[in-house]
Image: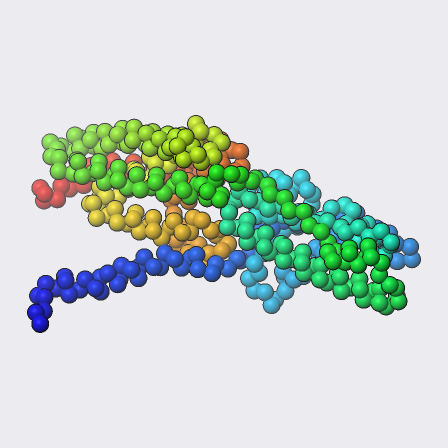
Amino acid sequence: MHIPKNKLMLLSPLVILLVVFIFSLTMIPTINPTPKNLPIAIVNEDQGIKIPNQVELNMGKTIVENIQATTNSKSAATPPVKWIVVNSYKEVKAGLDNQEYYAALVIPKDFSLKQATFKTPAPVSPELQIMINQGMNATASTVVTQLLNGLVDHMNDNIRIQLLQGFEKAGLALSTKQATALISPISRKLINVNEIGTNSAGGNSPVSLFQPLWIASLIGAALLYSTMKNKEYIDKKEKLFDKLKQLGIGVVIAAFAGFGLTWIASGLLGLHIPHVTSTGLFLTLSYLSFFLMILAVISWTGLPGIFIFVLILFFGAPLLMIPKELMSPFYHNYVYSWLPMRFTIEGLREMFFFGKSFSFNGSTMVLTGISLTSLLLLLASAVKPDSKKA
C-alpha cells in the first residue's frame, strides 16, 4: 500500500479533529446553564389584619422573612435568586425599567385580609403579582418565570396543609367553596413588563442584528487592508494620510452598513424596530467601532490577525443570548466581560424593549471609546517599519 509522503496529508485528520474540538468548546456555556444570584425584587405592600384576641396577622411580612431566611441559609452557598427587598411598587417599576431586576414579586395590600377569609363561608384567594422583565433577556425571563411559578406552587402546598390541619384540629367540616379555594390558596397574576412584542426573534433581535454587522466589518476591514497593503509610500507622512483616508472610507461604509441593515431588517424581513433612525445611527457607530478595531489589529499583525475576530465571533455569540448570572465564573470574567459586541447588544436592547433612543451614554460611549482607541492604533501603524524595506 502506498503511504503518502506529504506530512500535511498525514496530519490532516488530527488537524480536523483539533478544529472540531476547539469549536465544540463554544457549546459549553449553553449546556445546562445554572442560575446564580439572579436579582429579583420583592415588595410587601400588605397592610395586615387585626384578629380579635390574637396578634396582628401580616402574611406578606411572613413570606418576605421566609424567603430571606431560605436565601441566607448556609446550605445554599450560591442560591439561584438574589432577593432584593424594595419599599414600594413605584420603586420596583423604576428598577425594572433601569434593568436592575429580572423580575419582581409584589404582595398587595389586601393579601392578609383575603387570607383570613378562608375561615369564613365565602373564602377569597389572595393574589401575588409576578412581574417579568421580559425585554432584559429572553432566556432569563423564561428562567425566572419558572422559578417564581415554582415558588408560588410551594407556598400553595404549605398553606393548604396548614389550613387543612387547622380545620381538622378545630373539628370543622369544609364547605364546597372552601374546598374549591384550597385548590389554589394563593392565585398569581403574571405581568410582562418591557415586553418583547411580536416580530422580535423571540426577544433575540439584538443578537440577530449583531451577527451580520460583525461579519460585514470583518470583510470590510480585510478588503480595505488587502487593497492597500502592497502600496509603496514616499515617506511616513504620506502613509499617515493614507490611514486617514481609510478612516473616511470606513465612515462611509459604516453608514451604508448601519442604515442598510436597519432597512433590510425592518423593511424586508419585518423585524420590529421602534426607532428606525436611532437604530441606524447606533448600528453605524457599532460597525465603525468594529471596523476600526479589526483594521487596526491587522495593520500591525497582518491579515492572519483577522482569525482573532473569527474566534471572538464563535466563542462570543453563544454568550450573548444568556444572562451573565447563568454563566460560569470563567466565561463571565474572562470571556463575556471582554466582548466588544456585547455593548451593541445592550444598546439595541434598550432601544427595542425599553423605549430608549440614540444618545451619547452607556453603550454609545463605550463604542465611541473603542473607535477612538482603534483609530489611534491605526494611525500609529503608519510609523511601523516596512517589512519589505527591512
168 w.r.t. 92: above or below: below
Q: How many marks?
A: 0
16 w.r.t. 102: above or below: below
Q: Quadrant of the C terminus?
A: top left
Residue at the farthest right position: 53
Looking at the image, which is closer to me, 139 or 85?
Answer: 139
Query: Quadrant of the rendered structure where residue 157 is?
Result: bottom right
Looking at the image, which is closer to me, 306 or 368?
Answer: 306
Residue 239 point in image, percent of width and height: 17, 33
Camera sees residue 221: yes
Query: Quadrant of the rendered structure where residue 347 is?
Result: top left
Judge from the rendering whether residue 117 lies leftward or rightward of residue 298; answer left or right: right
Residue appearing at x 59%, y 65% in the figure: 76
Q: Quadrant of the N terminus?
A: bottom left
Residue appearing at x 88%, y 64% in the figure: 172
Camera sees residue 55: no
Residue appearing at x 60%, y 68% in the figure: 75
387 w.r.t. 4: above or below: above
Residue 139 point in image, percent of width and height: 50, 50
Residue appearing at x 44%, y 34% in the figure: 270
Judge from the rendering whether residue 209 lies leftward or rightward of residue 158; answer left or right: left
Residue 352 point in image, percent of width and height: 49, 36
Judge from the rendering whether residue 195 lies leftward or rightward of residue 33; answer left or right: right
